[in-house]
Image: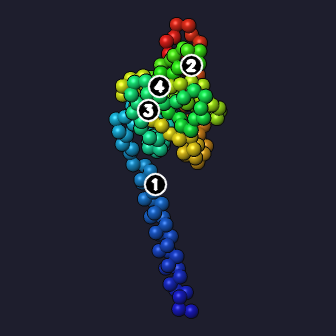
Amino acid sequence: GRLSPHIGLICSVVLVAVNLAYICLLLMERRPVQLSSIEKTVYELTFSSLTSRTFQRLFRLGKVIHLKRNELLICRNSESTMLYLVMDGSAIVELSSGRTKELNRGHFIGELSFITGALTSADVRGGHDNTVVLAWTNRDLIKFLDRDPVLSHAFDLILSTDVTGKLKRMNLPYADA
């Protein structure tokens, strides 16, 4: 009876409200992303294949850690729950053979354990007094990547490129790192 003429009006108001909410979300997604100077450096160095907005979410998922020279980050033959990225300074990888390799800005640490789930293969220490790394817990990172298959594939490619570069340098007799 009495509500019938109002039902159409109520439905229209609800539809307009839902559409306005979606328009606001779209506008927020399209506004330019302002990266901090460190975010911008890391983005250009390692993650330029991602959109800046996606990268910013990925960056903010991690935690910035400052290491002192020789401070132990990863212990050989341990279970790794973290993936690291060198943002500034360097990290020294101490292989079981006794050889050392230096990882500079833009290189990942713990990526093989992240990919395979295997125990860590080397000790890793801070190479400078103020080495800065970005650390993600494997659990949080996997959950984040699993939400977006395209992002997951892009991240896999970024990690694969890093691993390939390290393997090439390790097999060259004249390479220092």
Q: Is residue 24 above or below residue 91?
A: below
Q: Is residue 106 visible?
A: no
Question: What is the CA distance from the residue labelled 4 to the residue labelled 3?
Answer: 11 Å
- Which of these two is toward me, 176 or 29? 176
What residue is shown at x 39% (from left), y 48% (from top)? 31
Can you identify the residue that label 3 sits on?
Answer: 133
Q: Secondary structure at mark 4?
A: strand
Q: Is residue 99 visible?
A: yes
Question: What is the CA distance from the residue labelled 4 to the residue labelled 1?
Answer: 44 Å
N-term mark: 4 or 3: 4
Instruction: Identify the amino acid type marked 1.
Output: Leu
Can you identify the residue that label 1 sits on?
Answer: 26
Question: What is the CA distance from the residue labelled 2 to the residue labelled 3?
Answer: 20 Å
- In the image, which disc is placed on residue 95? 2
Question: What is the CA distance from the residue labelled 4 to the residue labelled 2?
Answer: 11 Å
- Which of these two is toward me, 118 or 59? 118
Q: Quadrant of residue 4?
A: bottom right
N-term mark: 1 or 2: 1
Question: What is the CA distance from the residue labelled 3 to the residue labelled 1?
Answer: 33 Å
What residue is shown at x 60% (from left), y 35% (from top)? 79
Instruction: Identify the amino acid type marked 4.
Output: Arg
Q: Nearer the viewer, mark 2 or mark 3?
A: 2
What residue is shown at x 58% (from left), y 46% (from top)? 143
Instruction: Identify the amino acid type marked 2.
Output: Leu
Q: Nearer the viewer, mark 4 or mark 3?
A: 4
Q: Quadrant of residue 170?
A: top right
Q: Nearer the viewer, mark 4 or mark 1?
A: 4
Q: Secondary structure at mark 2?
A: strand
